[in-house]
Amino acid sequence: MRRIYTLLILVAALVQFTFADDPVITVTNQNLAFIRESRSLAIKKGMNSYTITDLPEFIDPGSCQFTSEHFDFRIIDKVFNHDLSDLNSMLNRAVKTNVTVISEQGTIRGILEAFDGGYLFIETSDGVLHAVTRSVLTDLTFDDIGQNYAKYPTLRIQADATAAGTKDIIISYLTQGLDWEAIYSAFQDEEASTIDLSAEVAVSNRSGKSFSQAQLRLLAGELHEAPAYQAPRMQKRMEEAITLAAVPGEATPLSEFKIFDMPRRTDLPDQETRFIRFLDPVRIKVNKQYIFDNAVDPQGINVSLVAINDKSSGVGIPLPAGTLRVYQTNAQTEYIGADRLSHTAVDEKITIRIGKAFDLKAERKVLEQKRISNRSEQMTVQVELRNHKEDDVEIMVSEPIPYYRSYEIIKSSHPLTEQEARKVNFKIAVPAKGTTTLTFTLLFTW
């Protein structure tokens, strides 16, 4: 049976101010946002007390800053409350007050003496102490929850001001519950060896607060974060909306990161994901690569599209991390795979893995493995590559090298293409409807 917790309280009138409708919101792609809002506030000289209730549920209250460019406004102390965040905080306030509990066993009214994870201990007017199991409660009513009870996330502040009057105050804070991700679409023209790349950004607000006409900034990069205050989360339904906007300008550097400024102000209702156009289609030159790596897949040959993020290839702008879906445009458009694009700087390589080649197979065998001495070993490997396509292909064969071993290629049926500390690569031509066999011998020492 669904449990209902009813509050019967008297809330004292509070001096409050609410946030403006034009905040500046910098959203990281790590479920964290930095909010800055301007507010005209009636100030008196000396001590001032304010209560702020229009707050996100995931706010880090320790990050709240109140500043003014025109006068000295000093915060003396801050108190953060959110009693509805969990039942225990409400029960703490209700100890030694009257409560009424309804369970499957009936109704009990009395003074809440104590509680723990499993029971409420209630003393009735006849002096009997009842231990009520929390798991069977269907209704719990509080007579008096206290004057400082906070139905919503509430920040109470005391501030000292050097001058009186109506002043502009900048309020800034960090909150979780805001996140963003780039979503790329790539339409491949296989004959022309190009893709048309476009992108949207999906901005999600699950912070517990709606924002109107926000100046939205998207920060791309990996920020280091200390363990933060975890404000309570309330479960709500997520909705989606699509908004088209002009393509943002070039990314602005910020320390070691990139900032993308959205050109239009945006509404960010709570529990909504908004898709905003980020990159209009650009045509990029790509190369298709077939790769066999025994450590990744013992038989499958993976297919990747590779490009360079420079202006000559067609892009040449910083690309934030996100999901990249690939579609092929032949007689009709078909979806052919997706990959995760990492943060990609200008002039870096873009590699899009789209799946395994259906008509290409590889079979690796160890033909011989023998100990040469106490500190050396010899291994001969054979890789048979089979091509069932109508066209010739080139397949990159990558052979991983075990850690803590030095190696030398004693002989090989095909020339070595690339050599790394932990991997050797051979680029092998395989004719249409044909087979090519690569054989090589490695000498390991340790």
Image (cartoon, grey):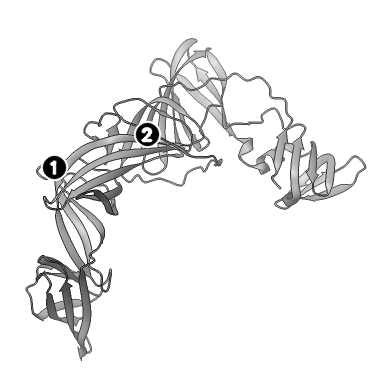
Extreme left residue here? 415
Image location (x, y in percent) of residue 124: 87, 42
Q: Which mark is residue 77?
A: none
Q: Give the residue type at disc 1.
A: Gly
Q: Report the side of 10 relative to 70 (left or right).
A: right
Query: Picture coordinates of residue 40 (x, y %)?
Result: 46, 15
Which residue is found at the position 27% from the left and 71% from the top? 295
Residue sitting farthest toward the top: 165
Image coordinates for residue 224, horizontal then vertical, percent: 36, 46
Which residue is at a point 59% across and 18% down the rendered structure image?
Answer: 15
Q: Residue at x 12, y 66 (%)?
A: 390
Which comes sooner in the sequence, label 1 or label 2? Answer: 2
Tell me the element at label 1: loop
Q: Is residue 177 left or right of residue 313?
A: right
In the picture, measured across the screen, residue 27 lies left or right of residue 79, that is left
Point out the image quarter for the C terminus.
bottom left
Image quadrant where residue 346 sits:
top left
Label disc, if present, on residue 314 of the rendered structure: 1
Q: Nearer the viewer, mark 1 or mark 2?
A: 2
Image: 385 above or below 26: below
Q: Is residue 341 left or right of residue 74?
A: left
Callout 2 secondary element: strand
Residue that carries the numbered disc 2 in the rendered image = 242
Residue 422 in sight:
no
Amino acid type, callout 2: Ile
Marks 1/2: CA–CA distance: 27 Å
Name the quadrant containing residue 260.
top left
